[in-house]
Amino acid sequence: MDFGLNEEQRHLTNSAREFMRNECPTTVVRKAMADADGMPREVYRKIAQLGWTGLIVPEEFGGAGLGMLDMALLLAECGHSAMPGPFLFSSTLAASALILGGTDELKRRWLPALADGSAIGTIAITEEGDSLSPDAIATSVREDSAGHVLNGVKMFVPYANVADFIIVAARSGSGADDFGFWLIERAAPGLSVETLRNLDQTRRVSRISLDNVTVPAHSRLEGRTQLLDRLIDIGAVAIAADSLGGSERALDMAVEYSKIREQFGRPIGSFQALKHAAAEIVADLEPARSLLWYAAHALDAQPNDASRAAAMAKARLSDIYTRATGRSVLMHGGIGFTWDHDIHLWFKRARFNESFFGSPVFHRERLARLSGY
């Protein structure tokens, strides 16, 4: 049995690496960081033309109908280039929420637009406590004659500033089943968005306030905690994929610098301590890559093991990304500690990935619970 990538997946990876090298160098990343919306719109237009934005959207809605493993390969290349923009959050999380739980009307309205890149979506789960547990959600929803009315505040919502719609988690009561997701259009009266300062400047997060926001009844997605659990799995794998690509880039940068920086008359890469540091990153990455591929494959083909595999991938890759970027900074020496050096794009992104969609502690506890401990 072949546990590697097939020919089409290898071609997808190689072509994505080449595209990102040409279209999203660090000059483009830094320009997007300085822009108000934090989105490289020309890059996003081109990836839509390539079909990336519709990669996991079913063919009947204008997408490619591929799986999470294919998406993970793209996300790793986005992480390798520290690509800004809502691709992960819109084309993976928001699209998955609609595919898994959207009503027929919501799917027809939004999935074709996501697939061709003409619409951007995002997802809002966490609040002040930054918890993914349904019990921590205080945003409320009630029914009236016009539909459903939502009130509350959501924190750290990615790219709400440019989204056309936001999928919001809310509660209608205190019971376990009194929980769900509603799709709210960005222009809905009563919805306000405040962009927050973020350590990872390659990404934008917002605080959204819902003040009697009214949506029609068909805006409710099907599924409750089951949909949340599935979205946590997908988000964990997506962030893990981005972390894998970022870790590889940190290693590449450290090795390249160690070849050209000389000390005591020879390249610093010849010193044993730096060789050990690079080797430890490689030793971390090789098994983690297989872990990620399996977790993404499980989401496509082995649902009974998907949550456990996703938790392991997110916990492990979060640790590796933090460690790899930290060692890369040290291997660069003094220049690595300057904020203007490019390694800090990945150093800060690693910290965002560590906490977003569950910390390593959260996912290890989740793994223990799923395993019956």
Image (cartoon, rainbow, N blue to C red):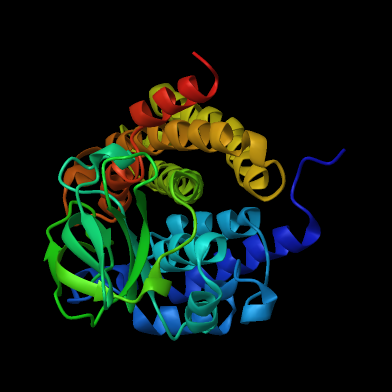
Seen from the viewer's position, the closer of residues 142 and 302 is: 142
Q: Is residue 126 left or right of residue 253?
A: left
Q: Is residue 136 above or below residue 365?
A: below
Seen from the viewer's position, the closer of residues 30 and 74 is: 74
Kindly identify the residue that appears in the image at 17 percent across and 55 percent down: 198
Q: Is residue 74 left or right of residue 249?
A: right
Q: Quadrant of the N terminus?
A: top right
Residue 44: percent from left, percent from top? 43, 79
Q: Is residue 124 above or below residue 144?
A: above
Kindly identify the residue that appears in the image at 55 percent across and 85 percent down: 49
Seen from the viewer's position, the closer of residues 49 and 145 is: 145
Kindly identify the residue that appears in the image at 52 percent across and 25 percent down: 370
Seen from the viewer's position, the closer of residues 295 and 348 is: 295
Quadrant for residue 36, please give it: bottom left
Residue 33: percent from left, percent from top? 23, 68
Kindly identify the residue that appears in the image at 64 percent across and 53 percent down: 69
